[in-house]
Image (spheres, rainbow, N blue to C red):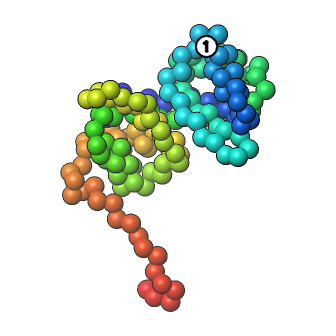
């Protein structure tokens, strides 16, 4: 995979009320920060906005002045072709190497273009190494899942 990169991802924990997300995004816009990719998850009590931006240093300053709790995490960004099965192939390759994916999300893509898959993995260097290796054949990529054995059977 070409052009894989490690990026800082900001996770902002927002109160689940109208206008809170808009306020955060307006503060970033005022500071001329471009949001490259983002995903919003919710629960009944709060939402979590995960995003990658073009200027992490300025983003840290802007978010520090806000009232919402923020965490910063290293994630792996992998360009993928916009075609059926591209994400499945990526997941298969990592699974075969025993690299767990904590979560993932992607950018939108134009038809025939590329998308950027954002992955939270425990070992970014190992994931990069696995994805930089030549693509295995379909036969090699079958992930063997172990089924739990019934108690008392071996």
Residue 29, horizontal then vertical, whole percent:
61, 13
Q: Is residue 9 visible?
A: no
Q: Which residue is at the far bottom?
A: 152
In which quadrant will I find the N terminus?
Answer: top left
Residue 73, horizontal then vertical, whole percent:
60, 35
150 w.r.t. 12: above or below: below
Dividing the picture into quadrants, the one containing residue 142 is bottom left
Element at label 1:
helix
142 w.r.t. 35: above or below: below
Question: Does residue 103 appear left or right of residue 98 in this picture?
Answer: right
Question: Does residue 92 appear left or right of residue 121 in this picture?
Answer: left
For the point 42% across and 43% down, the residue is: 127
- Which residue position holds label 1? 29
Q: Is residue 54 visible?
A: yes
Residue 124, horizontal then vertical, whole percent:
48, 39
In which quadrant will I find the C terminus?
Answer: bottom left
For the point 28% across and 38% down, the residue is: 83
């Amino acid at each position: 995979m070409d052009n894989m990169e490690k990026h800082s991802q900001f996770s902002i924990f927002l109160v689940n009320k109208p206008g809170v997300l808009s306020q955060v995004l307006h503060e970033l816009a005022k500071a001329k920060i471009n949001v490259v990719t983002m995903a919003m998850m919710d629960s009944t009590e709060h939402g979590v906005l995960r995003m990658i931006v073009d200027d992490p240093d300025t983003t840290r300053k802007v978010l520090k002045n806000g009232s919402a709790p923020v965490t910063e995490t290293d994630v792996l960004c992998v360009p993928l072709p916009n075609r059926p099965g591209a994400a499945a192939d990526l997941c298969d390759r990592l699974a075969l190497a025993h690299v767990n994916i904590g979560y993932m999300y992607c950018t939108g893509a134009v038809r025939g273009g590329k998308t950027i898959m954002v992955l939270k993995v425990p070992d970014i260097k190992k994931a990069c190494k696995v994805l930089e290796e030549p693509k295995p054949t379909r036969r090699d990529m079958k992930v063997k899942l172990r089924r739990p054995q019934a108690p008392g059977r071996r």
